[in-house]
Structure formats: C-alpha cells, structure tokens
C-alpha cells in the first residue's frame, strides 16, 4: 500500500485539507500545472455541461464546448499514471427551440478518443429526475423525460488498473438458490447462441455489475444541504450522488492512490475518496461552493484551512 500522505501542490496553499486530501480555490487550467507528471491514478469529474441556459457556476455554450474542454486534455494526459483513468460524467443538452438533443457530448467523446483510449461507456439513470425539458415533456407531451446521463471512461492504455471484483453486487435470491443447490440449473445454449455451462453454478463473491448506475439524486434533506442552510451558504445546484464516485473509485483505484476532481463543485468526489482510503485533490473556482464543501468533512480532522471554515453562529 502507498504511504498515506496528504497531497499538496508545491508552492500553493490549499483552501482546506484533510487527512488524505486537499481542496484548492482557482481555475483548474492553472492549478493542473502544479501537479507532477504521471502522479494521478484517477481523474473523476462532472464538468459544467453545455446547457442552453447559463448557470451561475459557469458553463460554456454548446458551440464553444468542445474547444473549451479539449484545452484540459493535454494536462490530463501529462498527470495521469501510465495505467490511470479519466472518467467524465457529461450529460446531454437540447437544441434551443427544438425538441431534439444536442450531440455535443458524443462529439466530445470522439475528440477525446483522438488523445486517449476510449474504454467503455457507462450510464447513470436517475429515477427521480424531473420531467424536462418542460416544454416538450410536460406541456406539449411530445417527448419523455431525460433521465439518463452518459459517463465516458478513457485511459492512456487499453489495459489500465481496474478490477470488477471490487464492485460486485449481491446475487439475486434465485442465483443464491442455484449456488446452494436448492434450484436445478440445466446447462444449455441460449437463443443468442451463448452456452451457459456448469461453471455458472460455481459462483463467486457476487454478481458482476452492468454499465448502468441507478441512483436517485434526492439529497435535498441530506447532511450537506442541511449544514449549508444552517450556515447560510448556497449549496452547489448540480451535485451528483455519491454512488457514482464510489463505484469508479473502488473499480479503478486502490487504497493510497490519488484521485483528482478538477471541477469539484460540492466535492462529492473528495468526500467519497476520503472514506475509501484514497488520497484526493479537488479544484473549484467559486469560493462559496468550496466553503460549503468543507461541511462534508465536519467529522474529519481538518488540517489546513480552518480560517475558511464556515463555523461561527448558525443562521436563524
């Protein structure tokens, strides 16, 4: 196991730090330059999407998005370990005034694939997603709600560090009955042509998960939101659930590895990495979001940045 030391960018003071990670305030384009070559095992991020309506956290318009994001790829390639991974949660957008999707995120997939090897596509299904875009879904009723976001996985190599045994899921009750010998399973050829043989009954530690992550994004009453309200801090409006970083951090890294989120927002990635025993770095441009993200670590030992901690008297 790697030594568990907090990663610090040389010459820069973190906004706050914990036992295993450091968060920095600033533009990722400048901060990335301070990371040593080949030192990051996993870049896991959800950057601003190319949405039609401008968001307060800043998001490039669809026509500029590809050029904007590709400006980071050179640094991503430089700092990744030879067997490291880049995982990007990049939701879709709609074309202004028309009931059809913008293909910018698929175009981005192609462009990044010219620089890094594209390994697999994953999808996040949010059952709690609101019916949007409202005009086409809820008013005119000519589309269904957009509830699935793609997640792209890249690496400098076709064989990066990865182990699906770290993300196995519990077997179904039927499968458990087969493994216990309580239910007969007959070796046969499926209609697809695949032949399922006796090895299927040997089982393992769990079921291999699919490339679909089902996680409702319903943390409006979660600890982060409640603490932000108490201290009068505006929470980040576009958070992804902890299930996403938890899956990829476990799948693609080992304890002691370094995880980076260059568009941290509320720093869900860093918080999950801390709990999984991975070192982490997070970058965020807006100080309010970074201050709010400190509240995720209230129960941890904060080594640096106490002067930025919200603390004080709660808002009433």
Image (cartoon, grey):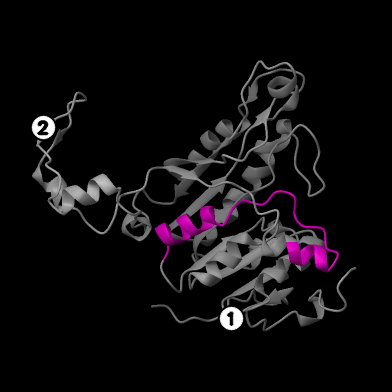
Above or below residue 102? Residue 284 is below
Q: Secondary structure at mark 1?
A: loop
Would you call the spot at circle 1 few (<14 residues within 10 Å), some (14-19), or many (20 or more)? some
Q: Secondary structure at mark 2?
A: strand
Which residue is labeled 1 in the image?
19
With 230 as the anchor, is 224 left or right in this view?
left
Q: Are marks 1 and 2 in contact (CB under 8 Å)?
A: no
Which residue is labeled 2 in the image?
188
Task: Give the residue drawn at x 47%, y 60%.
Answer: 249
Above or below residue 227? Residue 312 is below
Give x and y (percent) for residue 44: 55, 55
User: Relative to the observer, which residue lies in front, 131 or 5?
Assistant: 131
Would you call the spot at circle 2 few (<14 residues within 10 Å), some (14-19), or many (20 or more)? few
With 144 as the anchor, is 180 left or right in this view?
left
User: Relative to the observer, which residue lies in front, 119 or 271?
Assistant: 271
Give x and y (percent) for residue 129: 63, 38
With 156 as the anchor, is 130 left or right in this view?
right
State which region is magenta: 226-253
Which-is-in-front pick, marks 1 and 2?
Answer: 2
Quadrant assignment, res 228: bottom right
Asked if residue 279 shows in the view, the reply is no
């Amino acid at each position: 196991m790697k030594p568990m030391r907090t990663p610090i960018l040389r010459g820069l003071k973190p906004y706050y730090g914990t036992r295993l990670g450091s968060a920095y305030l600033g533009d990722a384009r400048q901060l990335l330059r301070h990371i040593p070559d080949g030192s990051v095992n996993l870049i896991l991020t959800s950057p601003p999407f190319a949405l039609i309506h401008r968001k307060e956290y800043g998001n490039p318009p669809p026509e500029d998005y590809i050029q904007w994001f590709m400006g980071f790829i050179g640094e991503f390639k430089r700092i990744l370990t030879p067997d490291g991974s880049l995982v990007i949660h990049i939701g879709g957008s709609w074309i202004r005034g028309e009931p059809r999707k913008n293909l910018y995120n698929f175009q981005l997939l192609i462009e990044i694939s010219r620089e890094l090897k594209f390994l697999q596509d994953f999808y996040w299904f949010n059952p709690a997603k609101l019916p949007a875009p409202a005009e086409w879904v809820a008013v005119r009723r000519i589309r269904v709600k957009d509830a699935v976001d793609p997640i792209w996985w890249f690496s400098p190599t076709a064989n990066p560090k990865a182990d699906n045994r770290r993300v196995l899921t519990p077997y179904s009750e039927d499968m458990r009955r087969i493994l216990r010998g309580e239910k007969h399973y007959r070796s046969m050829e499926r209609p697809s042509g695949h032949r399922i043989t006796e090895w299927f009954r040997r089982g393992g530690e769990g079921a291999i998960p699919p490339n679909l992550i089902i996680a409702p994004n319903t943390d409006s009453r979660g600890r982060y939101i409640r603490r932000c309200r108490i201290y009068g801090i505006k929470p980040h409006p576009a958070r992804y659930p902890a299930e996403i970083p938890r899956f990829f951090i476990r799948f693609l890294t080992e304890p002691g590895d370094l995880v980076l989120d260059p568009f941290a927002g509320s720093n869900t990635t860093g918080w999950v990495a801390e709990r999984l025993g991975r070192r982490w770095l997070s970058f965020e441009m807006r100080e309010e979001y970074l201050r709010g993200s400190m509240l995720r670590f209230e129960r941890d030992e904060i080594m640096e940045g106490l002067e930025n901690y919200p603390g004080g008297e709660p808002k009433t």
